[in-house]
Image (cartoon, rainbow, N blue to C red):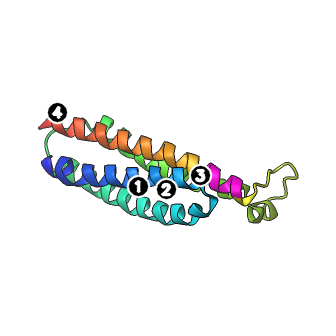
Amino acid sequence: MEYYAATVYPVVLAASAVLALAGVASLVVVRAHRVLTWVVTGIYVVVGAHLVAVVAGLLSGPDVDLVITAGYLLASLGLLPLLGIARLGAPEAKRADVDPDRPVLQPDQIARVDGAVAVAVAIALAVVSWRLTEVFGAAS
């Protein structure tokens, strides 16, 4: 599946790099957290396009190991809920939950948690995309 290696893989790598840079910026400068939230929205779009490309490749492409490909695809989708995980410690979340031991994060803590998670997710998305490129390349 040359379309994936030539088009989808570079887009996912570029989006992962932007996500990692926005995550680092959010770690350094708390105000960059707003930019990170926009980048996270873009990552959702890129991973959705990635999903469509992989499924299309499975349906029309070479004989690829379905279990491995589906596992990597589910891994890329499973990473998305981690983005923005610090919202669970936001004061609004505390009001919605009656647990007295639920921690409440300050805005700078929320920005730093989201930034660190964004860097980790960016690395994982790049690795998953690379592995899918290898799987599709081996099947060709």
Label whose residue precedes the other's in the sequence (1 or 3): 1
Which residue type carries mark 3?
Val
- Please state which of residues 130 and 29 is positioned toward the viewer in this rendering: 29
- Please state which of residues 56 and 138 is positioned toward the viewer in this rendering: 138
Residue at 70% x, 52% y is 109
Residue at 11% x, 38% y is 140
Label whose residue precedes the other's in the sequence (4 or 3): 3
Please determine whether, in this image, residue 34 is positioned above or below residue 19.
Answer: below
- For disc 1, the neighbor class at 10 Å (few under 14, some 14 to 19, many from 20) is many
For discs 3 and 2, the disc positioned in front in the rendered view: 3
Mark seen at residue 28: 3
Tag 1 and tag 2, C-beta contact below 8 Å:
yes
Which residue type carries mark 1?
Val
Please determine whether, in this image, residue 130 is positioned above or below residue 97.
Answer: above
Residue at 49% x, 56% y is 22
C-alpha gap between disc 2 and disc 4: 33 Å
Label whose residue precedes the other's in the sequence (3 or 2): 2
Tag 1 and tag 3, C-beta contact below 8 Å:
no
- For disc 2, the neighbor class at 10 Å (few under 14, some 14 to 19, many from 20) is many
C-alpha gap between disc 4 and disc 3: 41 Å
Which residue type carries mark 2?
Ala
- Which residue is denoted by mark 1 in the rendering? 18
Residue at 81% x, 51% y is 102
Label whose residue precedes the other's in the sequence (1 or 4): 1
Report the predominant secondary structure element of the magenta stretch.
helix
Local SS, label 2: helix
Answer left or right for 110 relative to 131: right
- Which residue is denoted by mark 4 in the rendering? 138
- Which residue is denoted by mark 2 in the rendering? 22
For discs 2 and 4, the disc positioned in front in the rendered view: 2
| Residue extent of the magenta highlight | 108-114
